[in-house]
Amino acid sequence: MFKNNCILLIHSSTILIYLTIITNAIEERIEEKSTKNLITFNRIAGCPDLESFQHPFETLENSDKIGKITCLCGPSRELINEDNEEVDDEKASITCIYGSKLDNLENTINLAKKANKTIEKIILNHVDFESEKELLQILLEETQTTSNLKYLEAKKCKNKPKFTEEKDENKELKQFNSLEWIVIEECLIEEMPINLLKRAPILKGLSLSGNKLHAINVQDLAASKMNLESLNLAGNLLSLQIEAGSLSQLEMLKNLEIGEHNFASTQLLIEIGKLTTLESLDMSQMDGIETIDVFSNFEKMPNLKRLLLSG
């Protein structure tokens, strides 16, 4: 009898332990789910975490804050899944969304500064560029926070971005020595952002598609001639104003997209034909392309592997 009672007590204790473990696991799961369904501000105080918006808006418990959100703070790397861990907790990215203004970007950069974060990536989508301070001025005022910037993107801008030169000629030129990619697409700019480009000495990729560029000068790309590997100028208004040496100075260029209604002028074709390192050339939907003699224009391009002339 005593033996049976002992066995019963042991079984009861075992069951109680299992129930405790299961209960704790359920509570942790509920707490985890609750946390994932909140707009969090863990990375930079005052700036919503980008990861919060991997979930549908209707599942967010504090979704009433969505209408007030302008810029989000994320990791410096791409978000692949919600289980990714931070590679470097000192680095972050900023994404400003529809309805944002440059003032919102400036405020977020200041929040990052207070949190001792450096910004490696800035993405601006549908942002209003009408502001007392220009984008370049905002970035240069907080170089401690933006000095490690690697990627800068602005798409579908509201009001045309400006990149005005500083008036003080004696002032030392501040540079973004880590900036590798600049993307300014569908922003109606009419000139190369030379004052930004000359501050990016190791720039590898530049995309200015869907704008109103009508000329390319040697000075425009001079600062990038030793490192630029990818250039997208598709969808602009390029025609006759192509200065000799403007494109051909790009010694490392591998990819060029220059179609979508730019005009295949003689000077432009001459410049392209001198790009001996080019591997991929996209001239799709380019005006005047039907008159091109491919072999005579591009016979000195030994590395060319991909040529698109459709449309």
Image: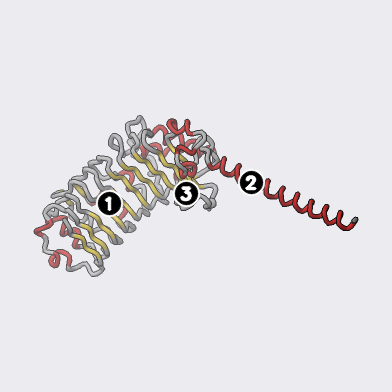
Tell me the residue at 35%/40% (across/down): 125
Question: Residue beneath label 2, please?
Answer: 26
Tell me the residue at 39%/49% (across/down): 151
Question: Residue beneath label 3, please?
Answer: 76
Q: Which numbered disc, 1 or 3, marks the residue closer to the eye?
A: 3
Q: Residues within 10 Å of mark 3 (few under 14, many from 20)?
A: many
Q: Quadrant of the C terminus?
A: bottom left
Q: Which numbered disc, 2 or 1, marks the residue closer to the eye?
A: 2
Task: Name the secondary structure under disc 2.
Answer: helix
* C-alpha span from label 1 to label 3: 27 Å
Quarter of the image holding residue 172? top left
Q: Amino acid at mark 3?
A: Ser
Q: Residues within 10 Å of mark 1 (few under 14, many from 20)?
A: many
Residue 20 point in image, percent of width and height: 72, 47
In this picture, residue 301 sits left or right of residue 182: left
Vertically, is 247 above or below 160? below
Residue 168 point in image, percent of width and height: 35, 36
Quarter of the image holding residue 191? top left
In this picture, residue 169 sits left or right of residue 289: right
Question: Residue beneath label 1, please?
Answer: 221
Quarter of the image holding residue 190? top left
Q: Amino acid at mark 2?
A: Ile
Residue 110 point in image, percent of width and height: 48, 36
Q: Earlier in the sequence, mark 2 or mark 1?
A: 2
Choose between 197 and 234: the one closer to the eye.
234
**Hey, which residue is sitting farthest right in the picture?**
2
* C-alpha span from label 2 to label 3: 33 Å
Tell me the residue at 17%/68% (across/down): 299
Choose between 146 and 124: the one closer to the eye.
124
Q: Earlier in the sequence, mark 2 or mark 3?
A: 2
